[in-house]
Image: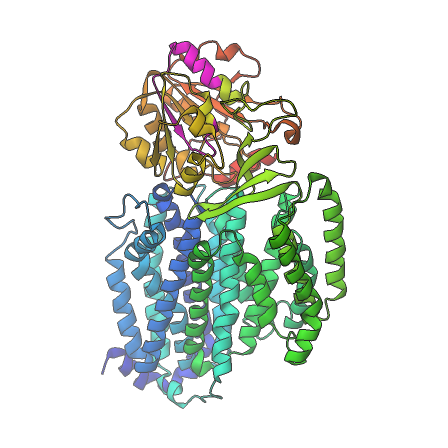
Amino acid sequence: MSSLDAASALTATHAPRSSGRVAPVLYVATLFVSALLLFIVQPMFTKMVLPRLGGSPSVWSVAMVAFQTFLFAGYAYAHLLSRLLKPARAAVLHLAFLALVALTLPLGVASGFTVPPDDHVMLWLVGLFAFSIGVPFMALSATAPLLQHWFVATGHPKNPYVLYAASNLGSFCALLAYPFAIEPFFTLRTQTLLWSLGFSLLALCIGAAACFAATGTAFVHTAAEGERPTWRQRAAWPLLTAIPAGLCIAVTSFIATDLAAAPFLWVVPLALYLLTFVAVFRDRPWISHELVLRLLPYVLAPLAISVFGSGKTYWFANVLLNLTAFALIALACHGEAYRLRPAAKRLTEFYLWTSFGGVLGGVFAGIAAPHLFNYTYEYPILIVAALVVLPGLFAGGARTFIREAAPGLIAAVVVLAVWFVTSARLPLAAEQPMQVALVALAALMLFQAKRPARFAGLVVFTFLLTGLWQPGLGRVKTFRSFFGVHQVVDTADGTHRLLFHGTTIHGAERIRAEAGQLLPARPEPLTYYYFGGPISEAIAAARGAQHHLDQVAVVGLGTGSLACHRREGEHWTFFEIDPEVIRVARDPRYFHFLSACAPDERIVLGDARLTLSASSERYDLIVLDAFSSDAIPVHLLTREALGMYVARLTPHGVIVFHVSNRNMELASVVAAFGKAEGLAIYDKQDDQVSDFTKNYRANAEVVVLARDAADLGDLPSWRGWRKLDATPGVAEWTDDYSDILRAILRKRL
C-alpha cells in the first residue's frame, strides 16, 4: 500500500469536510498555474525557432498543430491513468513523470535542428517541436483532465467542468501576459529560467492536490455512470471543436501575414479561442447559447463580403470583424459541445475526443490546406462548416434544407460556371458598383438571418462571387508555399502584371505598351523600385562613391525588379527563401526582369539569415528587401542579423534596408543598432508618388548604413535624405528580445 493509499484509509471520513473548504481553491490554483505555464511556452518557444524558419506565419500554424497533437497525447495519457489506476497511484506516477521532465529543463531547441531542409519544412518543424518540448508539453497538458478527475474523487458537489474554465482562464492570462508583461521586459534566456521555477511550483501544487484526491478514492467507484454517450455525441464532440481550432489558425494567418510573424500577434486569436471555453464551460455562461446563435448571422454577413479582396483601406476594422466572427463561431461550437457533454465520470473521455477534434482542425488548416489549395480557401470552408454543424440548419429535414438553400446554391453554381466559361474580368471602374452590390447582398443575408439554410446558401454564393471576381484584376497564376499565398494578376486593362503576396504587391511590370509604342528590351522597375526612388538613389550613391560595384547581394527576390538596376560587369547574387517565388521570377511567361537584366546571375535558395552568413563573398552593396506580405521578418532585424550583414561588407560597403511598413515603425530599430555600432545612418521617406494606379510606383522608406558617411558619396545632400539618430527609449532588437507592440504604437501615434 502506498503512503497515499494509507492516507486515504485514515482520513476518508473527514474528506467531505476538508475538501469542501480547501479543495476547490487548491484545484483551481493548480489548474491555473498549469495552464499559465502551458500557454506561455507556446509563444516563447515559437519565438526561439523563428530565426531558423524565416519568420513565416506558417511557423505558428505548424506550431499550433504540434501543440494540439501534444495536447491530445497528454489527454490520452490522462484518460488511461484515470481508467487504469486509482487517483493515489495515478498521482504517484504523474509526479514521477513530472520529475523526469524537470531533468530536461530549461527548455531549448533540440540538437540537430540547426538548418531547415529545402523540402518538407513542415515535417522538419514538427520534429523540432516534438524533440524539443513535446514531452514537457504532454506532461503539462495531462494535468487539467487528471486534476478534474481527482476533483471528482474528493466527493465535492461542484461541477468539475467549471474547473476546465478556470484552466482556460489561466491560459488566457498567460497569452495576454506574454506580449505585455514578458516579451518586452525579459530575454528568452530569462523567460526559460522563470518557466522552470514555475514548473517546480506546479509539481508541489499537484502533489498537494493528489493528497485530497486520495481521501476520496471510494467516490470514484461509487459515482453514478450517467447515460452512456451515443455514437452521435462522440462524433459531435471532435467535430464541434475541430472547426474553431482550424479557424484559429486561419484567422491567425490572416492577421500575421500583414503585420509580423511575432508572438504578440499570434496570441490574440488563440487568447480569444481559450476565452470562449471560459465563457461557456460553466453552469451559467457569460452569454447564452441562444443569443450567440442569433448574433452570428449579423457578423457573418459583412464577413462574407469582405474575406476575399477586402483591400487595405479599412484594414483595422476588417481585423476586428474577423476576430469577432471567429469568437462567435467558437462560442457557438464550444457551447454546443458543452451542451452535449457526458456525466462527470466520463469527463476524461470527453476531453480526449475534444482534443482529437483540435488535432483534426489544426491538421486541416495548418498542414493539409497549404497542399490542397492554392489559396486560403480553408477559411470560408470552415465558416460554412460551422453553419452546417450548428443547430437549425436541418431542423425541417433534408427536403426542407434543399428547398431553403437552393436559391443561394444555384446562384453559386451559375457564378462558377460563368467564370469557368468566360474567364471574364471586371474593370477597375466596376469596383464601386461591386461594393454597392455586395452591401445589398449582405442586407439580403441579414433579412434571412432567421432561416439558417437560406442564410447558409447565400453565404456560399457570396464567397464564390467575391473569390472569383475582384474589380481591376485578373488572376494569371495562384500558388501557395510554406511561406504564404502568391498571386500573379493582370490589371483589367491588360497593361500591367502584378505579384501579390497576401494583400501586398511585391512587384509590377508593364506588359503592354501605350498605343504606337514598343516595350523596351529591359523592363522598367516599378512599385518601390522605380528609377529615381529612394532604393534607386541609394544604389546609385553607393556605386558612385565606390566608382564600381563588384559584388552585390540582394535579400528578397519578388519579381526580380532590382535586377534591372544592375550594370554591366557587376555580379549580383539574390537570396530568396521561397522556391515558388524563384520559379515565377525566372519564368518569362510571368515576368521579364531576371531574363532580360540578369539571366546568368546566381539565386541562392534559403533563409538569407543562414545562406548569406555561410557565403564566403564580401559585398560592396547589400540590399535588404525581404518581406512576408507587408511584414519584415523580425529575425532579420536583430542585432545578430544586422551584425552579420556588416561583417559581409567590403571595407567601404553599404547596406540599403527597405523598411516600408503600414503597421510598424522600424527605422528607429535599425538606427539603434547603427548607433551602437558607430555606423553612419541615413533615412528617406519617399513622397513623390501620388497615384499608384496611374504609374504603378509606390513610396518607399529606406535606411542606409555605412561604416563612414564618405562611403555614401553625396547621398546625404540629396533631397529628402536625413541623418537618422537613435530614438530615445528604442532599444536594438536581438534574437533574445524584440518589442513588436511599441513598434506598432510608434507607427500609429
Question: Splitting the image into 4 quarters, where does residue 102 fall?
Answer: bottom left
**Which residues are drawn in magenta?**
538-561
Camera-side residue: 258 or 540?
A: 540
Residue 680 is situated, as x and y percent measured from the top left of the image, at: 42, 17
Question: Splitting the image into 4 quarters, where does residue 381 fall?
Answer: bottom right
Q: Quadrant of the N terminus?
A: bottom left
- Considering only vertical position in the picture, is 474 above or below 349? above
Residue 466 lies within the magenta run: no
Q: Residue at x 69, y 39 (%)?
A: 428
Residue 430 is situated, as x and y percent measured from the top left of the image, at: 72, 43
Q: Residue at x 42, y 65 (%)?
A: 359
Question: Splitting the image into 4 quarters, where does residue 707 fall?
Answer: top left
- Considering only vertical position in the picture, is 634 above or below 360? above
Q: Quadrant of the C terminus?
A: top right
Report the side of 441 relative to 154 (left or right): right
Residue 181 visible at all: no
